[in-house]
Each structure stands twice: as C-alpha cells, then as structure tokens.
Image: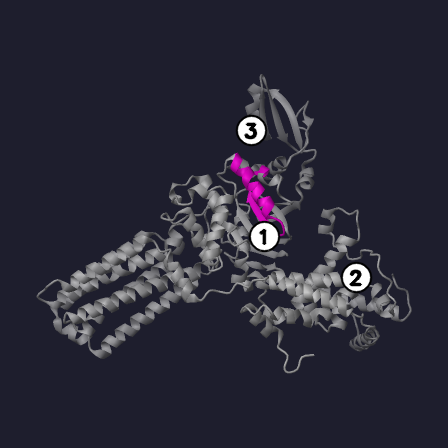
Amino acid sequence: MRRGSKLKDSEIIGRIKQGEAELLDTLIEQYYDGIYRFCYYKIGDREAAYDCTQETFLHLLRYIETYVEQKKFKAYLYRIAANVCTDYFRKNSVQTVGEEMLEWIPKEDTELKRVELSDQVLRALDCLSLAQREVIILHFFYDFKLREIAQIVDINMSTAKSRLKQGMDKLKRYMRQEECSC
Amino acid sequence: MLNWNDLENKKLEKEIRMFLESREEPVIEEERKRQSLEFLRLQRKSIHITLRKPYGQRVLEQAAYISPAAWVFQGLLVLVLGTILNTPFDMKEIVLANLSICAPIIGVIGFTEVMRSYQKNMWELEQACRYNLRQLAGMRLLLFAAADILVVAGVMVGGLSLGFGAEELLLFFLVPQLLSDSVYLYLMARFRRKFQGTVLIGAAVLMTLFWIQISMIIMEAPWLIYELSRPWALTFFIVVSATLLTALSIRFLHGIEKEEEGRWNFGWTD
Amino acid sequence: MELRLDRLTKQYKQKLAVDRIDLNLKCGVYGLLGANGAGKTTLMRMLCDIQDPTSGEIFYNGQNIRKMGEEYRNILGYLPQNFGYYPEFTAYKFLLYIASLKGIGKEKAKLRALELLDIVGLMDEKKRKIKTFSGGMKQRLGIAQAMLNEPEILILDEPTAGLDPKERVRFRNLISSFSQNKIVLLSTHIVSDVEYIADEILVMKDGRLIHRGAPEVITKEAQGLVWECRVDSKLAGQYVEEYNVGNLKNAGDETILRIISDTKPMEGAIEAEPTLEDLYLYYFSEEEKGQ
C-alpha cells in the first residue's frame, strides 16, 4: 500500500493526458485485482479470467487517447471488462451457430464447460443467466449503483432493474433450497 | 413495475448481501499477476500520447497556408497607405479623409481569406478535422488581426512623424476600420455558406462611399474634427467600435460550430 | 471498438432525412446502400460530428461523441461526396495542410503525405496544382487525406465516383488492407464496389435502415424475384417501360431481359440467381426511375 494521499482517478487520467503515460501503470495496478475477480465471477474460469483481465487492460491502453470522461473511469473500465468477457463467451462456447445469428440474438444463456466451482456462492451465481449474474456482481460485489450498472452493461435503467430483480429472485430461491433452474 | 413491498425488498437485499459476502475471494497468483503487469507495462511504453500543440504554434503553422494573393494585397495596401500619408496636400484633412476611405478595404483581404473555406467548398473537410472549422476561422481571424494591428501601428508611426496628431489618426483610421470590420463580420455570420466574395466587395464599396460622404461633411466643418478628437469622444468611439467588433467576431465564430437546421437543401447531399 | 447509434434522427423543415436509426458497428467494412435522398450523406455527416442530430446519440466505446469532440475527430477520417480545394495548393501541400488541421506533427506529416501519395498513385503529381487534376485524381487525393491520421473510423461518401475500373480495383484493395481492426463505412450507388469488400451491407431507404446483413445473406432476399426472359428485340423497349429491368442483353433478333418482379413476368421466364445489384434494384427501382 502506498503511503500518503492516494490520487483520485480523475487526477491521474488528467495527468496521463498531459503526457505522463507512466501513471497508466499505477492505474492498472490499482484495478487489477478488482477486474480479475469480476472476470472470474462472470466467466467462472480462473485461466480465462487472467486472459480477460489482461485483454481488458490492453484495450484500455489502446483507446486511452480517446477516453475523455475523466470522472467515470471505474465504470468505463468495468464496461470494457464486461465486453471482453462477453466476447470470450462468444468465441469459446457455441461452435455451430452462424456469425450473423450471434449478431442479432445476444446469447445470454450460453452453456460453457467450466472448472467446477466449489464455493456455494459461486454455485448460486451459476443459477443465474449471464446477464443477471453480471448485474448482481456489479451491484453486490462492487456497489455500483443501478445507473452505473446500466452504463457498464450498456442497457437502459429499466432493463437493469428487472435483471437485478430476477437475479435476486433466483438467488432467494436458491438460498431457500427451493427449485433452481440450473 | 416492481411489485415489492419495500420492507421485504430491504430484507431480501440484506440477506442476499450477507450470503454473497460469505464468498471466498479467488486467490490471485502473485507470479501470474506480476507477469501480466510486466507485459502491460511493456505495452504501455510503446504508447505515445500526442499532446495538443500550443495555440501560438498552431496559428503560426496556419500562416503558411494563407494564400499568397492575400499577402500581396496586404503589401500593396501598405504601399497605398504610405503614399497617402506622404503625398503633400494643403489641407491635412484631405489626407485624413483618404485614410478613412481606405479603412474598409483593409478588411476585405482578411475576411475573404477567412471565408475561403466556404467559397472553395473546403468547409466540410475542415469541419471533420481535429482542429475544426471554428478553430481554423479563429486562427485566421487572429492572423489578420495581427497584420491589421501592424498596419495601424505603421500608419500611426508614419503619421506622427509627419506631423499628424495621434487623435486624428485614431479617429480617421482606426475607428472606421473597426466599424467596417464589424459590418463584414455581421455579413459573414449572416451568409456563411452562401457567401460570395462579391458580398464583401459590395459592402466595401458601399462603406467607402459612406466614408467619402462623411469626409466631405467633415471637411466643410474643421471644428468638427476638433470636437470629435477630444479624449472623451475618441475613447468613446474606440471602445464602442472595438466592443462591437469583438462581439460580432464571437458571434461569427460561435455560429460556425454546427450547421443550423433547415439550411442544407442541396440536391446532391442527402 | 464499437460505434453505436441510438435512435439517431435528423429532421429538416421539409424532410425527415434520418429516421430513428439504431445501429451497432464493430470492426469491419460496411457498405451503405441507398438511393439519392435516402439520408446517407446526412447520416455520415452526423457520424463525423459535422452535424448535430435532431435527437438520438452516437457513442464511441461508450462515450458520447459530442462530448468527446476533438478526441473523436482525431481518430476519424472523412471523405465527403463533394469537396473543393484551394486552387493554388499542390497535392503535397494539400495533404500537409489537412495534416496540420488533424494535429499531425510537421515531420510525421511529411512522411505520411508521401506514403499516401505513393499508395494512391499520385506520387508523380505531388508538385502539381490540384486545379489541373482530373476527377479521378482529385478523388484519389481525397481518399489519401482521409487516411492521413491513421483513423480508427473511416467514413467515405461515394468514394469511387469518377474512378476508372483500374482505380476502383486499387481502391478496393486499399480498403481491404486498411480495414483490419478498423471501422470502415462507405456509401455508394455502385453495388459492385461493396459486394466484394463489405463484411456487411446496410440498406437505407427514406431515412430508415431497412435491411442489414452479409452480402451473400441479404442477396438471398431477392431469391425468386429475378427472372430472365427472352423477348423480341423490337418489343424490348416496351418491356423496359413496363417492368423493372435490371439488364438488357442483345442476342440478335431477341433480347434477353433480366427482370425483377414479385411474380413471374411472362411465359417462358426462368428464375435466375440473384445478385446484390438485383436486390438494390428491387428496393430502389422507383427512385432510380425518377432520375
């Protein structure tokens, strides 16, 4: 941990844009763990999570010049991570579906052969669809507000609300040992 | 519509939160993390953040792209002004009047250059660039403002050395120039894309005639010159015309940002 | 990288040019097909931040392009349908000028300008004034300026107008090699230009996006709508008036007509395999006839 006052994201981004590119290292280090965990919870695979984490930051580096909203960096970064994970699913799950179908129909409930998750919580998350899982993770693990979640996942507020509710209902049923549509 | 009971909602949330918090955070292997960070650091090093060039530098760069014709005319103008000042006349009023008449012509050069983007149909390309049309127009205005300031300074210096009074020079040269430029800027903001060079020239001609008229009036009444060049009157004229010019410049630049509604009815653009 | 259009609309006093377009663009080449007046140029202008929409937003990687402003234009390359030039400029100076507006440093600008002049085949003409250029040469110069800043997003409005067949092929190759990891959007009337290089075709009519898909896929839409008929050459003219004829081929006394029609136009008509051009005619025959 660093001594002294930690710089705010917006300050760091400001300085990066002024040319202090080295500060990107600081930023990446700061967010590495959080992004790794997010990818892990979303995909369920440790190996893939490392790959997606790296991919997220590579993406950040590639597009840092066009990043302008200095105040909402965290949501922006998690958005990149969410997209990277979604792309990972597309590439690694269903083989036979044609490209154009993937374009029109978001495959939220794609099956994925994964490493067995021993943790009960992770099994609970397993009950959720990918979309619901994403919202639950962002809300409960990272304390993102609904508005930020909508921005990260690129949906509107009402969709975010309903996914959250559906996710919570499913979790409730899992917790009560009721039927779970896994 | 969420049909929850608010209390039940909060209770459920708390329950879920407690449940989810019982999770074990996945252990991140330090070695893998270190390798990844190292790799990312390497990638980061090959990034180059392009900084904005300082404004002054950009303006000077643009000077290189002003059409040579503009500089030629500017030079000719200086010659003409020099000639006017130096021509021996019985009455200095005539010289001053001639200076006024030349005042509108100075603006024609600069503003024609500024409007070239529209006249030569380059505006669309320029607007899509990083430093878009508004900035470009601003830079051009600045360049010509600088050139005009030099011209005014030159006239002042030359005039003073030839025995003219500073107030007279200001009243007869600077003020008409500021006023004429204001008129041009108003016209440029008004017409913009439909702008033709003839609009400026037409305005120049009209204003020249106007100043000739004024000059004739003044020449009949030399006491008027004295009155008008009093400090308070002069200051008033200069401040008003300068403010007008500034306001109209801003208005012009501001209007360049994006095209207004309903002015795009070209047959081929859709 | 992603460009997202969210209910993008542009309303002029008399006309609704772009009507609530929702679109998601990822890396690749997109061909925008539509007749004149379909709203293509307006759409492109909005994408280039030259025009503000009446309503709706455009997002680049999740950020609103209007808020991005300069940073967005920095990764953009645009070729308008009609562009002018400053007459005293040479090709080389023109590129340097545009480069200065794009914020490219002097040294790099010189390198890029020469590189691109070479790629578009104007190296020998670099010291010539643009006013001496032919239409095709001007167009090639326009393509060169669009690529000066190595844009992430390339928007080209009727880029092949005025190019001869050899130049067209060269252009297609240029775009194909450039489009790796980039978004390229080109609008055209000339179907053959996009048929081979576009990953996806976007069909626009009356301001709306009526169809979207890979060329092979949307061409199938015209299955069963294309017929080949042999008619007496003397009567060929009548048929052209009456039907939507895509192609006429002379075969002595007879003329082979390629007709686009929902139903079999006449006895002896044989169903033909549709091409993208047929699809275009199917959608836009009324507009084209009005020309």
Q: Amino acid at mark 3?
A: Glu
Label 2 belongs to which residue? A47
For residue B265, side relative to residue A125 (left or right) = left
Q: Residue furthest top?
A: C253
Which quadrant: the C terminus of chain A?
bottom right
Q: Position of residue B208 (x, y in %)?
A: 22, 59
Q: Amino acid at mark 2?
A: Glu
The residue shown at (84%, 63%) is A126
Instruction: Give yes or no for residue B200 being in the magenta stretch.
Output: no
The CA span between labels 3 and 1 is 32 Å
Does C158 sit above or below residue A127?
Answer: above
The 10 Å Cα crowd at callout 3, few under 14, some 14 to 19, many 20 or more, is few
Q: Nearer the viewer, mark 2 or mark 1?
A: 2
Q: Position of residue A24 (x, y in %)?
A: 62, 68
Q: Which mark is residue B90?
A: none
For residue A161, side relative to residue B256 (left or right) = right
Along the line of sight, the residue nearer the viewer: B259 or C207: B259
Which quadrant: the N terminus of chain A?
bottom right
The residue shown at (73%, 61%) is A52
Label 3 belongs to which residue? C241
Q: Amino acid at mark 1?
A: Asp
Q: Position of residue B32 (x, y in %)?
A: 75, 66
Label 1 belongs to which residue? C19
For residue B125, side relative to residue C259 (left or right) = left
The 10 Å Cα crowd at callout 2, few under 14, some 14 to 19, many 20 or more, is few
Question: Residue A47 is drawn in which quadrant?
Answer: bottom right
The CA span between labels 3 and 2 is 66 Å
- For numbered disc 2, what is the local secondary structure? helix
For residue A159, side relative to residue B201 (left or right) = right
The 10 Å Cα crowd at callout 1, few under 14, some 14 to 19, many 20 or more, is many
- For numbered disc 1, what is the local secondary structure? strand
Q: Which residues are magenta?
A: C165-192
